[in-house]
Image: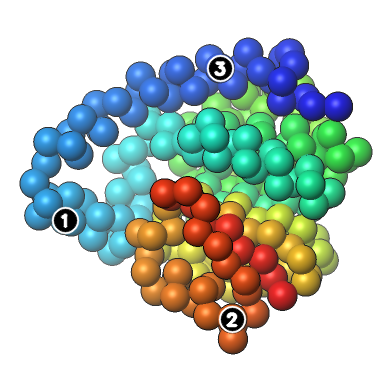
Amino acid sequence: MNSLLSAPIAPLLTRLFAEAEAADAPLRAQLAQSSPAARAELMNRAKTDYRGFYGMAKELFLPVSPETGRLLYLLVRASNARSVVEFGTSFGLSTVHLAAAVKDNGGGRVIGSEFEVAKVARARENVALAGLSEFVEIREGDATESLARDLPASVDFLLLDGAKVLYPAILTIVQPRLHPGSLIVADNADHNPEFLARIRDPANGYLSLPFGDDVELFMRL
């Protein structure tokens, strides 16, 4: 079974990725035309005022790429993950990939997190259109609070795709629930060099591998 390649999920993802491309294109064009100093200032704001930064981007999808989405599905299926945590749900494109894999594994739950109220509503709508609501819980609010309670005793898979400055904090919150073999994907982890140094040091209990240009894949030892 591969729900990712059949209706209603396949046509939904095609539409959503097209919408994301159109919605996010102006930001990409602006960044391409900005000076290195202006880009650095923007990235610094993402570190020092992540709520303000992502509040400015509340109309943007900022999704994983289609290739990363398929990678998420593949990893969850291959590891037979049933318990998945997602930091940074946005409009739910990555959530749909994760939940489709959980469904095809025979069931389980994806716990997502998003602090923009409008994005939570849209993500839930997209998950429902995909026919995956029974496998998904999206928690509204700051993930450092919403993911700090009522997590499953064991987490098989963790996706980090929210504010990069919070990657260390979210990993610390979820880490006690990870077991040997749990997989973690961090999108755009290169935006947080200190975090990369942490997970690439085997002394900290992870085996890490850069995957493509923008993804870090690592496993709990």
- SS label for mark 2: helix
- SS label for mark 3: helix
Query: Residue shown at 59%/86% (left/top)?
Result: 203
Q: Check if mark 1's residue and mark 3's residue have beta carbons within 8 Å.
A: no
On screen, 202 above or below 111?
A: below
Most foreground residue, 49 or 46: 46
Residue 34 pos. (x, y %)? 11, 41
- Disc 1 marks which amino acid? Glu
Q: Earlier in the sequence, mark 2 or mark 1?
A: 1
Residue 127 pos. (x, y %)? 67, 28
Question: Which residue is under mark 1?
Answer: 41
Q: How many angstroms separate mark 3 from mark 2 (CA)?
A: 39 Å
Picture quadrant of residue 197: bottom left
Q: How many angstroms separate mark 1 from mark 3 (CA)?
A: 34 Å
Question: Which residue is under mark 3?
Answer: 14
Crowd band around label 3 with a 10 angstrom C-alpha radius: few (<14), some (14–19), many (20+): few
Crowd band around label 1 with a 10 angstrom C-alpha radius: few (<14), some (14–19), many (20+): few
Most foreground residue, 123 or 206: 206
Question: Which residue is under mark 2?
Answer: 202
Query: Residue shown at 61%/17% (left/top)?
Result: 12
Frontmost of labels 1 and 3 is: 3
Which residue is the extreme one toward the right? 106
> In screen coordinates, is 176 left or right of 145?
right
Q: How many angstroms separate mark 2 from mark 1 (CA)?
A: 32 Å
Give the colour scheme of this rendering: rainbow
